[in-house]
Amino acid sequence: MNSTIIMVAKSFCCGKKSVSLVSQSSAGAKSVPHKSSASVGVTSSATSTTQASSATVASSGNATSSSAVTSPTRMSKDQPADSKLASAKRTSGKKYPNDFIFGKVIGEGSFSTVYLAKEISTNKEYAIKVLEKKHIVREKKTQYVMREKEVLTSVSNHPFFIRLYCTFQDTDRLYFVLSYARRGELLDYLRKLSSFDESCTRFYSAEIVTALEYLNGLGIIHRDLKPENILLNDRMHIQITDFGSAKIIGKDDVQQNEEKNSRESGQPEGSRENRNTQRRKSFVGTAQYVSPEVLTSKSTFSSDLWALGCIIYQLHSGLPPFWGNHEYQIFQKILKLEYEFPDGFNPVAKDLVQKLLVLDSTKRLGCPEVGGFGPLKKHPFFEGINWDQLWEQDPPDLIPYLPATPSNPSLWSNYRPGLDDARIGEIITETVITEDQRKELLEKQARENDFHRFVKGNLILKQGLVDKRKGLFARRRMLLLTEGPHLYYVDPVNKVLKGEIPWSIDLRPEAKNFKIYFVHTPNRTYYLEDPFSHAQEWVHKIQEVWQRYYGHH
């Protein structure tokens, strides 16, 4: 094992654009940030190579954005006692763990942990990805690590990718010093807003296209492109990350052997069971975005174009086109091209998605066989995009896409809604009542209300059917506002609790018209449609409950 780890260390530190590194660690080289600590210092002696020393902080690989370091500390017990040796290290240009203050964990991958760190000499923030050598060897991930380092080195000068500043190591670990994406994942914003309007979808799709065109020119396939791997820098421009699944065309494809080994199941090669097992075990990427050819272990440049189609669909509608209860069900839908466009989906965007989600990888818009990225960039959906100045432009404000629908043709009306005295299918209880009244109402609720079992003994203050929207998709739910306070939503047909809107002092309801109202929370905005036009009543009742529980703050 030890000899294998030494080989990993030498491989990690050798490459076309980096100086060979030799692991020479002192006795105090085993200190590492602890995941449970908000801020831990690291000291270690190691040899390193620096590829760049300064640039605008941008993003991190496999990381979820976080705030700045919280009360960082730095250990000093393992610092070299010899001041001359310490001085020599500072002037050598090399980087060491004790050159940084390690803060909180901001991301975790399958075989790595990412820390928010601050360089002591410059006070700049970085995302440092730490990988355990023994784990890499044990899980046979050496080639993935090497490939990611090579790809990061190749793309670091492009504005739409994370930047690798340097790599170094100690006895037990490898370190990637990456730019830090302060604004976090694109997925976080998509979850909060549910979907993006046409302008936002167009702009961010154009930035992804620009990045893919650059990757294509380098002979690189990402193979795991998804909103989670698209980070945002300070200016809200994209920074694509996570190249552990990438493929470099023209290089020895070691991963083919890895995938071949993973497909061995002891069944006849041509059996249906073995083919299904192969699809489940051998695909690279994430199920909802994986292309049909990748499921059969054939990656092409066009595979990323398929993922682009899935992302455009999700940005505009709120959900990926292919989803199911488990991966195999998703794979079957992908292979059958089984998906639908919801009502309200922009027709021009629909045409683009249909030309990207094509089973034949040689017929997707943007692939080399149909003219490359030129025809893709000329698609009418991208009309008005200045391709040469995307990086200099200010991204549009992120706005949810909530178009008019047959059931609600005037969602964005400017008039203020009034009140309707009807009480169709609703229960409204006064917020301030005596204890005797509460006890009586609870007993009646337990006897007569089918939804009492979902509210954990709390008195229901308001109840009614709503259409809970996620992007362009809507599901009918019974909304239950209770003491506590709580906002439960239940599947009224199958009588299953589906979730709860989290209450906090920051919760804020907002009526848009008679039917539509929003419930804003710190991490998400819930879009609700009342089929009986009682949106304003819901807002008043939620505000009343908020005042009761949080008004004294």
Image: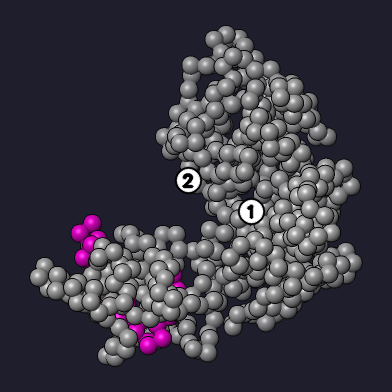
Q: Earlier in the sequence, mark 2 or mark 1?
A: 2
Which residue is disc 1 drawn over? 229
Asked whether the beta carbons under mark 2 and mark 1 sit within 8 Å of each other, the answer is: no
Rounded to the nearest angstrom, the CA distance separating label 2 from label 1 is: 18 Å
Name the residue located 73 percent from the left edge and 56 percent from the top edge: 277
Toward which corner of the image does residue 7 lie, by quadrant?
Answer: top right
* Residue at disc 2, secondary structure: loop
Residue 47 lies, in percent from the top left, at 69, 22
Q: How crowded is mark 2: few (under 14 residues within 10 Å), some or many (20 or more)?
A: few
Which amino acid, mark 1? Asn
Name the residue located 47 percent from the left edge and 30 percent from the top edge: 40
Residue 287 lies, in percent from the top left, at 67, 60
Which amino acid, mark 2? Ser
Along the viewing direction, whichever of 541 and 448 lies nearer the viewer: 448
Q: In this view, does 321 lie to the left or right of 514?
A: right
Name the residue located 34 percent from the left edge and 80 percent from the top edge: 464
Q: Give the range drawn in magenta.
A: 526-553
Q: In this view, does 70 lie to the left or right of 355?
A: left
Closer to viewer: mark 2 or mark 1: 1
Q: In this view, does 86 lie above or below 169?
A: above
